[in-house]
C-alpha cells in the first residue's frame, strides 16, 4: 500500500509539471516499459466465490468478493516428491483435488508446445511425474478427474490415476509428417485456433479425437543456419532443414476424420460422417446428456457453409443438427466461440449483418436471437439458463470501444462497465463476479473486481507506475480523426504529432497499418499502437515524425458488409484506402505531403507493398516486414476463406498480387523477413525481390537467419527497429 501511495503522489506531481523529463529510447520501447499488468491468469473454482492464481512459487486461492488470499494451495519450496524447478502454468482437475504442473516448455508452432508435467495431489502435498516417456502436448483431465489424456509423438495416451497412474496408449499410427492424433496440423492451429483436438465425454467413459492425415500435404523445408561455425573445420554442415507440411491455396489439405475410444473396453470406432474429403473439422465437443452426444463442427472448403452434426460415439451414427450459410464466408468465431449450457447452446452469427448471439436447443432449433442492433458482439462469457441472462462484450457504446454487458431473458440490457474505452472480463463460475481490465488510448490498464451488477468491489492493479512513466517520458496524446473517401466511405483513425508541428513547420507522416480482414488497429485502448502506449509511435514523434493509423475497408467492428466487401479481391480496397488516408493527411496544414511513408507487418507488410504500387505516387518510402506477396503462396484455409481457390478466382488473385503490380511500385522500399518464418514463408519475399531485380528496381533488404514470423528476441527486435528508424531518417529527413 505504501508503494501505491508513493506512485500516486508521483503521478500527481508529474501532472502538475506537465513536461517530459526522461528521454525515451528504443530500449525502453522494446523492453516493455509501457506494457503494464492486465488481469492475472485465473482459474475460477466450482464454488463461484474463489479463483486460483500463481504468485511466484505459490498457487494461491483468492476470494472474488474481497480479493483476500484465503488459502495457499501449493508452495513449490515445500512440495514433496518430484517437482518442477519453477512454477509455470498449471491445470486444476475438475474435482479440484489435483493440479498438473508444467515445466520445460518447448515451442512448436504459434500456440502449440511440448512440456514436462507433474501431478500434484493437494491433500498430501506431493508431486510425481505425469509420465516417464518424455515431454507431451495438451494434457487434459477427464471430468471425473480419474484420467489424464495427453499427446506424445502424434499419439494419444491415457494415464489412469485409479490404477497407480498406469499409462495406456490409445492410438499407434501417429507419425511425424504423416498422421496426427488429437493435435492439429499447422494450418488448423494457425487458422482455426485449434490446439487440442480431443475431448472426454461428460461421463468420462469415452474419448473422441480428430485424426489428421497430412501425408499428401505439400512440404516446405525451413532452413536453420549454423550460427557459430568452427573456423578450423574444412567441412561442416552450415545449414540444416526442418520439413513442415503447409497446404498452399488450391493445394491439398490434411484429410480429417473423427474417432472414439471406449476407455473401459478399449474399442476404437470411426464416426460415420458422409463428408467430402476436402471438408474441414475445426471443432468437436461432447455435451452432457444421456447419450454423451458428440457435436462435430464441419466447414466446406470455401468456408461458406458450417454444419454441426450430433454423433453417437458408440453407434457412430451422425445426424445433421444445424446448418449456417453465408454468401461470402463464415468467420471463425461461429465455431470457435460456440458454448454449450445443459440442454442449450449459444452460437454467434452474422446472418443479420452484425455479429450477434443466438440461443439454440440441442436439436438445432432456434429458441431466440439474444442480441440485436447496429453493433458487433466481441465475446461471450456466460449464460444462466434459469434466468436466461447472458454475459457478453460488445462495441455498442462506440465502434472502437468495448464494454461488458448482460441481457436477461426478456431482452433487458445492463451495461456492467460504464467507462468509455475498452473492458475485458474474466467471470467466476456462475457469473456472480468478474475481474475487469479497462483502459483507453491515454490510460494504462486498470484491473478491478466486480459483482454481477457491475458494482466495483476493489482494485487489483492500477498500473500507477506505468502512468508515471508515460508522463515522465511525455508520451504524446493520441488524436482521433475521420474523413470521407472519394466514394463517400467514412474511415476512422488516430494520430500522434511531434511538438511544434504547425503550418510553418510541416512534418513528415508515417502511416502504420495492418488492414487484414476483420482486424482493427484503431482501438480505444492502451494497447493501440505497435507497442502498448503507442511507445514506438511516440519515439517517432520525438524524431520529428507524425504517425497515423487508419482502419480501411475490410476491417472489423462495422458489420459484416463493411468487413466482407474485400471478398475475392484482397488488397485492392485496403490499398486504395491507405492511399486515401495519405492524401487526407497530406491536405492538413501541419503535414508535409511530399514526405509520407507507410509500414506494416505480415498482412500490414503485404498492404504496404500493395499501397506503394496502387498507382498513386503518394508514398515516398515504405517498410514491409514479413509480407505475403502473392496469395498463391499462402496457406489454403486462410486464403480461400477470403479469395476462393486460385482456379475459381484467377482475376482476383492477379489483382491481389503485389508481384503482379510491381511495375507500379513508387517510393523507396525496405523489405524485411525472417528466414525461419513458418507462417509467411521467405519464398514470398524471395519471389518479390526477384521481380524487383528483373524490373530494374533498387530496394533495401534485411533478413534474419533463424528468426520466425514475429522476429522475437530483444537484440533482434532492437536491430530491426534501429534499421527501420534509420531507413525513415534516410528517406524522410
Image (cartoon, rainbow, N blue to C red):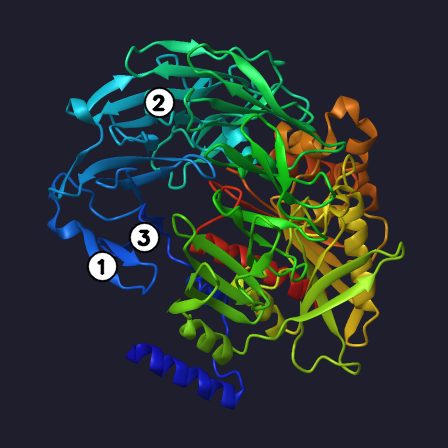
Mark 3 lies on a secondary structure that is: strand
Are the two marked residues, 1 and 3, in contact with CB atoms closer than 8 angstroms? no
Callout 3 touching callout 2 (CB < 8 Å): no
Left or right: residue 731 compared with residue 134: right
Going from the N terminus, do you reach mark 1 or mark 3 first?
3
- Residue indicated by mark 3: 51
**447 or 220: nearer the eye?**
447
3D distance between C-alphas at marks 1 and 3:
10 Å
Say whether disc 3 or disc 2 marks the residue closer to the N-terminus: 3
Residue at 13% across, 46% down: 79
Left or right, 214 with reference to 374: left
Q: Is residue 666 visible?
A: no
Rendered-image quadrant of the N terminus: bottom left
Reading the image, the residue beneath label 1 is 70
Return the x and y of residue 709 as percentages of the image width and height.
Answer: 53, 42
Q: Which numbered disc, 2 or 1, marks the residue closer to the eye?
A: 1
Q: Is residue 41 left or right of residue 80?
A: right
Circle nearer the viewer, 3 or 2: 3
Amino acid at each position: 500500500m505504501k508503494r501505491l501511495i508513493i506512485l500516486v503522489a508521483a503521478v500527481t506531481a508529474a501532472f502538475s509539471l506537465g513536461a517530459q523529463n526522461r528521454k525515451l529510447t528504443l530500449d525502453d520501447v522494446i523492453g516493455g516499459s509501457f506494457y503494464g499488468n492486465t488481469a492475472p491468469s485465473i482459474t475460477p473454482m466450482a464454488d463461484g466465490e474463489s479463483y486460483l492464481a500463481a504468485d511466484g512459487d505459490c498457487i494461491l486461492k483468492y476470494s472474488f468478493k474481497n480479493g483476500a488470499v484465503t488459502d495457499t494451495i501449493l508452495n513449490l519450496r515445500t512440495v514433496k516428491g518430484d517437482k518442477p524447478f519453477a512454477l509455470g502454468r498449471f491445470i486444476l482437475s475438475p474435482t479440484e483435488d489435483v493440479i498438473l504442473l508444467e515445466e520445460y516448455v518447448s515451442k512448436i508452432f504459434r500456440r502449440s508446445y511440448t512440456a514436462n508435467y507433474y501431478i500434484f495431489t493437494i491433500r498430501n502435498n506431493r508431486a510425481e511425474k505425469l509420465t516417464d516417456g518424455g515431454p507431451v502436448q495438451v494434457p487434459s483431465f477427464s471430468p471425473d478427474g480419474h484420467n489424464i489424456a495427453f499427446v506424445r509423438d502424434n499419439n494419444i495416451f491415457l494415464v489412469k490415476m485409479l490404477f497407480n497412474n498406469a499409462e495406456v496408449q490409445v492410438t499407434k499410427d501417429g507419425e511425424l509428417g504423416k498422421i496426427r492424433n488429437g493435435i492439429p496440423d499447422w494450418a488448423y492451429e494457425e487458422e482455426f485456433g485449434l490446439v487440442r483436438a480431443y475431448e472426454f465425454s461428460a461421463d468420462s467413459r469415452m474419448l473422441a479425437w480428430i485424426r489428421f492425415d497430412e501425408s499428401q500435404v505439400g512440404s516446405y523445408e525451413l532452413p536453420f543456419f549454423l550460427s557459430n561455425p568452427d573456423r578450423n573445420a574444412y567441412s561442416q554442415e552450415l545449414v540444416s532443414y526442418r520439413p513442415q507440411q503447409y497446404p498452399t491455396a488450391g493445394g491439398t489439405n490434411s484429410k480429417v476424420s473423427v474417432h472414439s475410444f471406449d476407455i473401459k473396453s478399449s474399442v476404437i470406432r470411426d464416426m460415420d460422417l458422409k463428408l467430402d474429403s476436402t471438408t474441414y473439422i475445426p471443432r468437436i465437443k461432447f455435451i452432457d446428456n444421456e447419450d454423451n452426444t458428440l457435436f462435430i463442427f464441419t466447414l466446406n472448403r470455401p468456408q461458406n457453409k458450417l454444419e454441426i452434426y450430433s454423433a453417437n460415439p458408440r453407434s457412430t451414427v451422425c445426424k445433421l443438427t444445424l446448418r449456417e450459410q453465408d454468401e461470402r464466408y463464415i468467420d471463425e468465431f461461429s465455431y470457435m466461440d460456440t458454448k454449450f449450457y445443459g440442454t442449450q447452446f449459444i452460437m454467434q452469427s452474422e446472418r443479420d449483418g452484425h455479429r450477434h448471439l443466438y440461443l439454440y436447443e440441442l436439436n438445432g432449433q432456434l429458441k431466440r436471437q439474444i442480441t440485436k442492433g447496429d453493433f458487433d458482439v466481441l465475446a461471450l462469457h456466460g449464460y444462466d439458463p434459469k434466468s436466461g441472462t447472458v454475459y457478453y462484450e460488445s462495441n455498442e457504446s462506440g465502434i472502437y470501444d468495448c464494454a461488458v454487458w448482460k441481457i436477461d431473458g426478456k431482452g433487458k440490457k445492463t451495461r456492467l462497465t460504464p467507462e468509455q474505452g475498452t473492458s475485458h472480463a474474466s467471470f467466476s463460475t456462475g457469473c456472480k463476479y468478474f475481474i475487469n481490465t479497462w483502459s483507453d488510448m491515454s490510460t494504462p490498464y486498470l484491473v478491478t473486481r466486480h459483482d454481477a451488477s457491475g458494482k466495483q468491489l476493489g482494485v487489483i492493479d492500477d498500473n500507477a507506475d506505468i502512468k508515471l512513466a508515460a508522463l515522465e517520458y511525455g508520451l504524446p496524446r493520441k488524436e482521433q480523426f475521420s474523413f470521407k473517401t472519394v466514394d463517400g466511405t467514412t474511415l476512422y483513425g488516430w494520430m500522434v504529432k511531434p511538438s511544434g508541428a504547425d503550418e510553418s513547420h510541416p512534418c513528415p507522416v508515417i502511416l502504420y497499418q495492418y488492414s487484414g480482414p476483420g482486424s482493427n488497429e484503431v482501438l480505444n485502448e492502451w494497447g493501440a499502437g505497435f507497442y502498448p502506449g503507442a511507445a514506438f509511435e511516440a519515439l517517432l514523434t520525438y524524431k520529428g515524425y507524425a504517425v497515423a493509423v487508419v482502419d480501411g475497408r475490410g476491417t472489423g467492428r462495422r458489420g459484416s458488409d463493411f468487413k466482407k466487401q474485400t471478398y475475392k479481391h484482397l488488397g485492392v480496397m485496403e490499398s486504395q484506402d491507405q492511399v486515401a488516408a495519405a492524401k487526407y493527411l497530406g491536405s492538413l496544414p501541419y503535414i508535409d505531403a511530399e514526405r509520407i511513408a507507410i509500414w506494416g507487418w505480415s498482412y500490414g507488410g503485404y498492404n504496404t507493398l500493395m499501397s506503394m504500387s496502387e498507382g498513386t505516387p503518394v508514398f515516398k518510402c515504405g517498410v514491409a516486414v514479413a509480407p505475403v506477396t502473392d496469395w498463391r503462396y499462402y496457406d489454403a484455409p486462410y486464403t480461400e476463406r477470403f479469395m476462393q481457390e486460385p482456379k475459381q478466382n484467377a482475376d482476383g488473385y492477379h489483382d491481389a498480387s503485389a508481384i503482379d503490380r510491381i511495375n507500379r511500385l513508387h517510393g523507396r522500399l525496405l523489405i524485411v523477413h525472417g528466414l525461419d518464418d513458418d507462417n509467411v514463408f521467405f519464398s514470398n519475399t524471395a519471389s518479390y525481390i526477384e521481380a524487383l531485380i528483373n524490373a530494374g528496381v533498387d530496394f533495401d533488404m534485411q533478413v534474419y537467419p533463424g528468426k520466425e514470423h514475429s522476429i522475437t528476441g530483444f537484440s533482434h527486435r532492437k536491430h530491426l527497429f534501429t534499421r527501420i528508424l534509420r531507413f525513415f531518417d534516410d528517406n524522410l529527413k
